[in-house]
Amino acid sequence: RGGRGAFSGLNDQLIMDDRRVIIIGAGFAGLGAASLLSSKCHVTILEGNDYIGGRAKTAILSDAGGKSNHKTLELGCTFLHGSEGNALYSIATLHHVIEEHHHDHLPKTVNLLSSGGKLSEEAVDRYRELFYEVQTETVQRSRANDWTLTINGHPRVDARAGVGTSPSLPSVSLPSHPPSHPPSQPSSQPSSPPQSRADLSDYLAGRFRELSASSHADDRSGPGMNGVRPVLDYLLREEGLDNGTKLSEGVDLLSYGDFDLSEDGLEDCAIAVVGGYSTIIGAVAAGIPSGSFRLRSEVERIRWSPLASASSSSCDAEALSPVRVVCSNGDVYEADHVIVTVSLGVLQGRKDLFEPPLPAWKQAAIDRLAIGVVDKVALQFTGPLVEEEHDAIAFFWTEIDSDYSTIPSWAKCQSKIDRLANTNVYTAWFCGEDALAVELMSDSEIVNGMVSTLELFLKRAVERPVVVGRSSWGRDRLFLGSYSYNPHGASKEDRVVLSEPVDGTTPMQLLFAGEATHPSLFSTTHGAFESGQREARGLLKIYSH
């Protein structure tokens, strides 16, 4: 494979200012690379869309008369994650566009039961704390590779050794008064590590039930709650949004600790941006010459020149063959280096993008990872659905699915809808297979399902809203997904391999950036931005004397 130290003997021959670098994609990874390279060499940024920002896309809402009301809706990236050590947070602060800063970004929520009534925020928060305790414990065990833990008295076993599978987990009643403090010590005994296809959903659910049971063995179920399932299902749906897919669709347990804000000194908090992500995009792009951007330039083929022999490393610099990038509009560009920042979905779905194909070691890493889909649908009502002080409505399903046969399956997988501040616009979130299904629906079909769901929980008639914005990241050919996650068998090592450059007849001919290439900050905008700057620094290093 290639390497960042390869061709170091050419440093004295090559001059950076006459090098040509093509950056494919004007999302945060591409902008990060261009911000460091545009003053050092000739940079061309090829973007298939008619806007810059990639999966950060801010829409401006209009009022009934079609005029802008200056309210913004994020169709893609929504929050900054952490402050200290986050380059994008620093940029946002410099331009005075930080809106709020608090841990977990939990809005004031009304928690509704499908059977009628509601749960107090205090009760849900206490169960959330218990779930967070389970998450924290699971992260620690993942990073230490320590799975000496029982689930309901059954040790987890290693399917690779042929000695069993995950145990079935009995349901446990949910008490009306959750614990103020979760148990201080988990029950444990020596056991084998989890199976090779260890499922995160099963593990989190089992551990949550176990700790709930040990804390409330003598308590009775809360009214209408029908056991622990409603609140647990809600928390698992929320976790699914963080991963970009429903946990039941195969999120890996063993690598759960790979995502790590603390590795970069970042705290776990969500920060909204005044005016939307477009303000940060504009601030970063302002430092890049406008002539560097080529919009509506979807890349059709990247023709690169593999290193034919070791002797190529000693050839004259001027004889080195460039890489050629062909766009769907017929334009052709030549460069010494190409920084590829397309999404993991495009790398997986466009096997013909590279000519010749990528080396087997690179393709294998691409194929082991997975990309999730998270979509939003914004619905405008004539008035608030609940009391105006509430920013969100959370859905707790208290009966089995068959009891609500009139509600479409995609609607049952929602965790909540969020109200856009100072508006009557509510945003519904969908992920995984449900998001892909919603992408194929008409506005009318979505409205029908949402009205049925809201009427069930609110126990009253609900007006038909107007769809004022929706995303389709999964079926957009320029993305084919929202952000990456680790499926069964994947790990941060795959992301490291994905980030490795590929040498051709020029050193580091193909470089790779994007959120999926960051070993610990995947799925975040600043992880993408850092990855672009990482590749830029790698290029600058080989030209330094």
Image (cartoon, grey):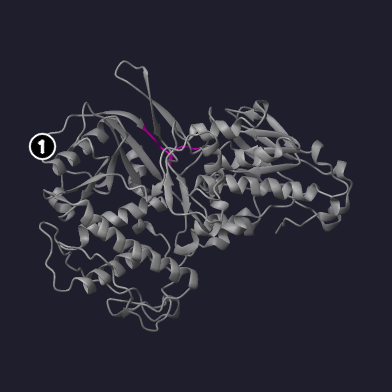
Judge from the rendering whether residue 91 lies leftward or rightward of residue 61; answer left or right: right
Residue 383: x and y in percent read: 21, 28
Most distant residue in the top direction: 65
Q: Residue at x 42, y 47 (%)?
A: 270
Tell which of 48 and 188 is nearer to you: 188
Q: Is residue 254 above or below residue 146?
A: above
Identify which amino acid the numbered label 1 is placed on: Arg
Residue 99 vertical placement versus 489 (above, below): above
Residue 534 percent location from the top left of the image: 65, 49
Query: From what the image shows, is residue 380 above or below residue 259?
Result: above
Viewer-proximal residue among 439 and 536 = 536
Q: Secondary structure at mark 1?
A: loop
Q: Give the quadrant of residue 471.
A: top left
- The residue that appears at 35% across and 55% down in the rendered structure is 239
86 left or right of 190 in image? right
Instruction: Point out residue 503 in the picture as x, y percentages from the top left corner.
Output: 74, 52
Residue at the location (73% across, 43% down)? Answer: 337
The answer, for residue 371, to whether it is visible in the render is yes
Q: Residues within 10 Å of mark 1 (few under 14, many from 20)?
A: few
* Quarter of the figure with residue 456: top left
Image quarter in which the N terminus is found = bottom right
Q: Which residue is mark 1?
A: 460
Segment colored magenta: 470-477
